[in-house]
Image (spheres, rainbow, N blue to C red):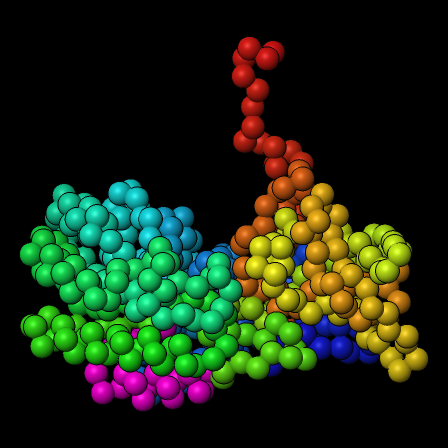
Amino acid sequence: MNYFQYKDGILHAENVSLADLAAEVGTPFYCYSVATIVRHYNVFRDAVKRLDAKICYSAKANSNPAVLQIIAKLGAGCDVVSGAELLLALNAGFDPKHIVFSGIGKTENELRSAVQSNVGQINIESESELKLLSKVASELRQSTTIAVRVNPDVSADTHEKISTGRKEDKFGIPIGKAQNIYTLAQNLPAVIPTGVAVHIGSQITDLAPFREAFTRVREFVELLRKDGFDIQTLDLGGGLGVPYNQAHDIIATPDAYGTMAQEVLGTLECRTIFEPGRLIVGNAGVLVTRVIHTKHTTDRKFVIVDAGMNDMIRPAMYNAHHDVISLIEPNAKDVLETVEVVGPVCETGDRFLKDCELPSPERDHLLVLTTAGAYGAVMSSTYNARPLIPEILVNDDQFAVVRRRQTFEEMTALTQLPDWLD
């Protein structure tokens, strides 16, 4: 459930009209609902409450500072994958002891910042990283708690580019070789190996891959404990999917996911970390866009909107589906047309939805891409010299611009000509 609903024929975010927002801030823009974020967090929290669980929101899904602060105030921890995300999390008020630093390519400076910030856990992805962290922590004369991210070689049956738990993927240490890393960690200074981490991918709709991965992790923890390792924490990552195509997607529920995790791992009596991102914010956001042209060809009608793949790259990058709906509620008299909704970027891949049924969309009509709260604004760019678009946060009948529209001068502020071109 989300809080984007038609009221008096106009799509609203909670109690704010998206048409009024479009008139005030212009299009395109992202809009997020506080009530939806809070509801989704609470649903997931309740789903895993039978485990000794801590939810560490995955900041990479949506790292707008206002969104982060809302989630921090709910009592969540945070999963970060860069030094800048760590700073964003700290600035948003997340307790450092509930911050997990993940990611495969942490630099020496990022590791130093994590140790100095006293983050609760650093997830190790390689022997090289482990040795570097030991060196950095020793120089700082601080000890730091680690988990080793294992790769269980489980296919998550999701898109190729967001599958992370197969043996050919770059993430984690093969589970059959990971015990050697724990032995090394135990013999290195300033690192304390107390956890096992796993994450097999994103937008996973079926529980079977999770169950398989968690079963392998349970067996691995039992093996480690038998050999004397004090494993206290399981970091199970995120990855549970959300419905992008409301008419067809069948998604495992958070309740079913929590029940499965309890069945497989409950007897280990470990503290459990979950790192949902998309699940919390995906359906809490929409992208509002305006039709700028329509165009008929021999076999289709193109609806060209002012949002482009630089604003929302998921369809171009992942062939991802986002429902496209009219901001004005269709009625029984409307004749639906099958159209292709595309953006203005100079790429054939700048397509949002190929076979979309809309009520006779024409110039200046407002359209809405749903389920746009995750991996939308955070992945946007200025390709084709298109400035970044606003992000709007709605709370009941209030709204705030939490990222304003970028100006041309701001977009080009970091560039400069060499002296020899003057």
Q: Position of residue 419 (x, y in %)?
A: 54, 12
Decide whether the magenta segment is chiefly helix, strand or loop: helix
Depth order, front residue of 255/7: 255
Seen at 26% across and 75% down, the residue is 217
* Residue farthest to the right, as pictured: 333
Depth order, front residue of 43/96: 43
Q: Quadrant of the C terminus?
A: top right
Q: Is residue 140 something that shows in the picture?
A: no
Does residue 144 appear to the left or right of 24 in the view shown? left
Q: Is residue 263 something that shows in the picture?
A: yes
| Picture quadrant of residue 333 | bottom right
Does residue 312 appear to the left or right of 419 in the view shown? right
Depth order, front residue of 57/68: 57
| Picture quadrant of residue 102 | bottom left
Q: Quadrant of the N terminus?
A: bottom right
Q: Is residue 257 magenta?
A: yes
Q: Is residue 86 magenta?
A: no
Does residue 17 appear to the left or right of 163 in the view shown? right
Q: Position of residue 334 (x, y in %)?
A: 90, 76
Seen at 74% across and 63% down, the residue is 354
Seen at 54% across and 54% down, the residue is 378
Does residue 101 appear to the left or right of 291 in the view shown? left
Q: Which residues are magenta?
A: 254-277
Seen at 36% across and 81% down, the residue is 211
In the rendered image of this protein, does residue 343 appear above or below residue 166? above
Q: Position of residue 135 (x, y in %)?
A: 15, 45
Q: Position of residue 245 (x, y in %)?
A: 64, 74
- The total number of labels drawn is 0
In the rendered image of this protein, does residue 29 appear above or below residue 156? above
